[in-house]
Image (cartoon, rainbow, N blue to C red):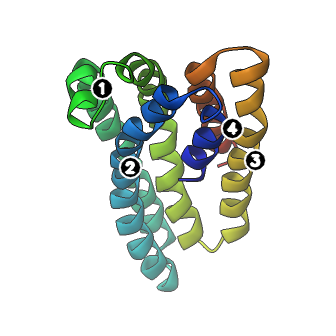
Amino acid sequence: ALYNLVDAYFVGGLGTSQMGAISVAFPLGQVVVGLGLLFGNGAASYISRLLGHGETETADRVASTALYSISDGAVIIICTLLFLRPILRLLGATESILPYAEIYAGIYVVSSIFNIFNVTMNNIVTSEGAAKTTMCALLTGAVLNMVLDPVFIYVLHLGVAGAAIATAISQIVSTAVY
């Protein structure tokens, strides 16, 4: 949500249609986050109990299985891209917002594969007792997005595409931290 808040703050200076595009695309990101939470929360609960019983090998297998969220996410991403225009219209994109929403959402949805990984790993890593690692990964991406957004949007004049690219790079960096 912090990524979207930062994107909205900086994109707001471009105009109302661009701001509307970010708002319309927001639910697409929440579906992706929900997928990561589905796998991550379930795995985290089980991993914590397994580690408490000293069953590290089984806990490793559970963590590996949870990462299948990425393949499920890839299927959702492909389906979303195939039907992006009608989905954006269903989410409220008007004729003036739709071109910006397609640009932003196209980049944002593709890069959300990293967000699925990050949300899943956030739960798994926390369940293993490494909360500082999780905090570093999340903060690194969030702070980087705050720095890159104005650069890509205003300095490089990429508009809403710049906001999506900044978010994608930030999520990739968080993935690298995990």
Dot 2 or dot 1: first in sequence order is 2
On residue 94, the disc is 1
Dot 3 or dot 2: first in sequence order is 2
SS category of the residue bearing label 2: helix
Residue of label 2: 30
Residue of label 4: 173
Q: Which residue corresponds to the image point at 78% horizontal and 25% vertical from the top-left?
A: 151
Q: Is residue 131 left or right of residue 39?
A: right
Dot 3 or dot 4: first in sequence order is 3
Instruction: Mark yes or no: residue 118 visible.
Output: yes
- Residue 1: x, y in percent? 53, 53
SS category of the residue bearing label 1: loop
Q: Determine the CA span between mark 3 and mark 2.
A: 20 Å
Q: Determine the CA span between mark 3 and mark 1.
A: 32 Å
- Is residue 118 depicted above or below 70 in this figure? below
SS category of the residue bearing label 4: helix
- Is residue 4 depicted above or below 155 in this figure? below
Dot 4 or dot 1: first in sequence order is 1
Residue of label 3: 143
* Residues at circles 2 and 1 in contact by the CB criterion of under 8 Å: no
Q: Which residue corresponds to the image point at 28% horizontal and 29% vertical from the top-left?
A: 88
Instruction: Using a 10 Å C-alpha cutoff, classify the residue at mark 2 as few (fewer than 14 neighbours), some (14 to 19) or many (20 or more).
Output: few
Q: Determine the CA span between mark 4 and mark 1.
A: 33 Å
